[in-house]
Amino acid sequence: MKQILVISGKGGTGKTTLSGALADLASREKQIVLADADVDAANLELLLEPEKQETFSFNAGKTAVIDQDICTFCGRCEEVCRFEAVEQKEDGSYIIIESMCEGCLSCVHQCPVEAIDVVVRKSGEWHRSLTLYGTLFHALLYPGEENSGKLVTQIKTAAKKYADDNNADILLIDGPPGIGCPVTAACQGVDAAIIVSEPTVSGRHDLKRVKQVTDFFHIPSFLVLNKSDLNLAIRDELIDLSKTTDMPLLGEIPYEERIIYAQAQGKPVTQTLDNTISKYFSDIWEKIKNHI
Amino acid sequence: MIITVASGKGGTGKTTIATNLARTIAQARKAEIESTTWLIDCDVEAPNAALFIHPTFKKEKKVERLLPVIHHDQCAGHGVCVDVCESNALAIAGGKTLFFKELCHACGSCVLNCPEGAIRETSEMIGLLQQGSSDSLRFAQGILEIGFSSPTPIIRDLKKWIIPQETQPNSTYILDASPGTACPVVESFRGADFALLVTEPTPFGLHDLKLVAELIFKEFQIPSGIVINKSGRGDEIIEQFAVEKDIPILMRVPLSRDIAEAYAIGTLLVDAFPQYKAKFNGLHKKISEILQKGLPKQ
């Protein structure tokens, strides 16, 4: 079983559009399992018409709370907190500002009189769903919550186990933008990363950064250029970059407004658009099969 | 006045709106002596605003945090550090304690709890802050170091570096946030007066706009307004949501290949298409009016 991750650095380059198309194309020939690792803006479900089979709570949001009856005002919690979440009030008592608390629980372990409790809240949920293309693991991190990386790890672990148990050929993971915690979590254990970029100054800048991340984790990376005819000079530069940095080009998709409009139909573009567009995606899928 | 620009979904045009709005305000106020306009790029994972503003940086500051170093000769392998680490950045394998820097949130708890005192700390650079200017616009950004995955401390330090505790009435700060609705976005909204939500009229754009609007409603209760980028076909799904939630639509930028091509080479809309100067002035005016009126009663 191969785990393939789709990432981009920059948001909105077409990760989910590509993931949806690959889900459609790959599922015609192989047994696949899908995971949406963009847990705070999960959009793959909008293309795959999932039917939820099971829902699980994600209980990871931890906050420390001081029991004022036990607290002796020693101030040790304020001393050890590195996130400025402990505040001393005018009367000398201490409180923890929930929105600043990272849930590291350093204060809980250090309090000499055990006056600090841990409150665990539900900070999201995740689902196992059936789709026409394969089983999908997807999640919703409640807005404003922390620990997106942990939720990514949870759905990826569940998806991997399910894929192994069912002898799937491919686990396809639609990744998050950026290079932070959720991307780090999404990168663990994958066999290949497909980086979706575009020939714009931002696309180029963020491609270089996300490539450093895949190199950091020693993950073989591949390039897909979306909106590739938007600027030919930058396009050529990115293709050179793919050659010099061992990031083979899997294919190019031109700037095409029909692809944007097709999202409204809630299906992979390979289902809704004619062969002139679908072909770009099927060529990419053929290349993936050769490489990975 | 602090305006945070966010979107939920990536690539909807946060940076386009933030950079053009900031440039427009800075130019309009050029003649006012005491006024300052700042653009602060808080998307420290993928900072792109500088590519459009072309600033000259005058100052730099390292963001450093104390990260643990395990002294293996003193480690007895009790695993207390593994138990107390809420970030799963420590593990024991083959009797040896392993540290995964990329997962560490630099809380220091492992150091305080090691019974052998085998973990000490060393200051490591986890990000870089830069500030400078481009014409009359001041600019600052933070850059997260590759190999460290927590962007929030960089954003926190960046804001502290630039925004004073008490902001002056004639200072404007435009903050360009990262995509999503998790902790880095929360940090970018902390202290903001207005939420400018940039979306696109697709099911993806709407889905993520709803999440970011929920975040504002739940955590910040500040006024907000919507910009529809790539506007044209499908705007009605955003309009319907805007009416339901009573969030005004302040501006539209059409879906256009010409605009995308100008963006590709790092040109501001107001430079490529001068008619946008009036549109962005209008956007600034609408935001100012909403803020003067105060929060609409719920």
Image (spheres, coloured by chain):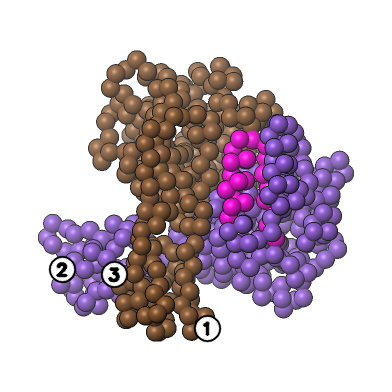
In this view, the residue farthest toward the right is A275
Towards the viewer: A138 or B103: B103
Residue highlighted by disc 1? B94
Measuring from the top left, give residue B9's x and y in whole percent. 57, 46
Q: Is residue B239 above or below residue A269?
A: above
**Residue at image coords 41%, 53%:** B125
Say which of marks 1 and 2 sits in front. 1
Quadrant holding the C terminus of chain A: bottom right
Residue A73's tag is 2
For residue B77, which quarter of the picture?
bottom left
Which chain corresponds to the colour brown? B
**Chain hosting mark 3:** A
* Amino acid under disc 3: Cys
Q: In the rendered structure, are the residues bearing label 1 and label 3 in contact, judged by CB atoms less than 8 Å apart?
A: no
Calculate the distance from the C-alpha at mark 3 to the C-alpha at mark 2: 13 Å
Q: Is residue A3 above or below residue B191?
A: below
Residue A21's tag is none
For residue B265, which quarter of the picture?
top right
Within 10 Å of the Cα at label 1, are there few (<14), some (14-19), or many (20+) other Cα atoms? few
Calculate the distance from the C-alpha at mark 1 to the C-alpha at mark 2: 42 Å
The magenta stretch spans which residues?
Answer: A192-214
Residue A107's tag is 3
Q: Is residue B117 above or below residue B35?
A: below
Which chain corresponds to the colour purple? A
Towards the viewer: A208 or B69: B69
Say which of marks 1 and 3 sits in front. 1
Q: What secondary structure prevails in the magenta region?
A: helix
